Image (cartoon, helix red, strand yellow):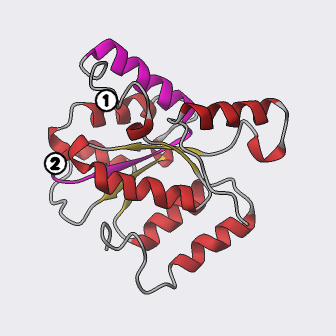
Amino acid sequence: MARKGINKAIDYQFQLFENKRLLCNKEYTMNRTCIFISHKKEDMQKAREVANYVIDCGIDIFFDENDPILSNPETNNDPVIVTNAINKALTRSTHMICVVSNKTKESWWVPYEIGYVSNKPPFSTQNIGILLVNDVQILPDYLFLAERIETVQELDSFLKSVSNTPTFLRERLMTFNEIEEHQMKSILK
């Protein structure tokens, strides 16, 4: 059975990942892809669907909903703690999918996250996917520098291009396009 990805925001999953990596298990190499899921809080449900889909494709993620600091209302009001937690998550990640809706323009954190990773090796604009949900109408210019994802085929293509998982998982991604009711159709075209 194909290995699912993990959410590195869940500490025990990350520790298991680190322990196996340190034991030099080939599947848990340092080069394993990890996608940071960036979103505005009001888009949490759509971001959760994207995160679950990426995990099902065998790719690791960082999704803040499960981070003990970022999901804690007591620490969520301290900008130093939040910034440090976000920076730590971005450091653990190799790629980003930014869930963009019409609500995103009101976000303070999404532009910060994109700006942070745009200038941080190994990140570049090719490592960032801008996932446009169905209702997006206007984008700021800086979002045109990254790869735009508007359809399920573009999402699958982005995931295949950033994945360093075994070939059979890539083939599994291709078969999703053949399913008439793709699980991401509620978000993408």
* 134 sits to left or right of 62: left
Q: Which numbered tag is attached to residue 112? A: 1
Q: Position of residue 97 (x, y in %)?
A: 42, 49
| Residue 189 screen position, x and y as percent | 31, 74
175 relative to 50, above or below: below
Q: Position of residue 158 (x, y in %)?
A: 51, 60
Q: Which mark is residue 103?
A: 2
Position of residue 122 relative to residue 52, above or below, is above
The mark nearer the N terminus, 1 or 2, is 2
Q: In screen coordinates, is 70 left or right of 52? A: left
86 inside magenta stretch: yes
Task: Assign the N terminus to one quadrant of the image.
Answer: bottom right
Q: How many marks?
A: 2
Residues rendered magenta in the picture = 78-103
Label 1 secondary element: helix
Tag 2: residue type?
A: Lys
Q: Which one is closest to the eye, mark 1 or mark 2?
A: 2
Q: Is residue 85 magenta?
A: yes
Q: Quadrant of residue 117?
A: top left
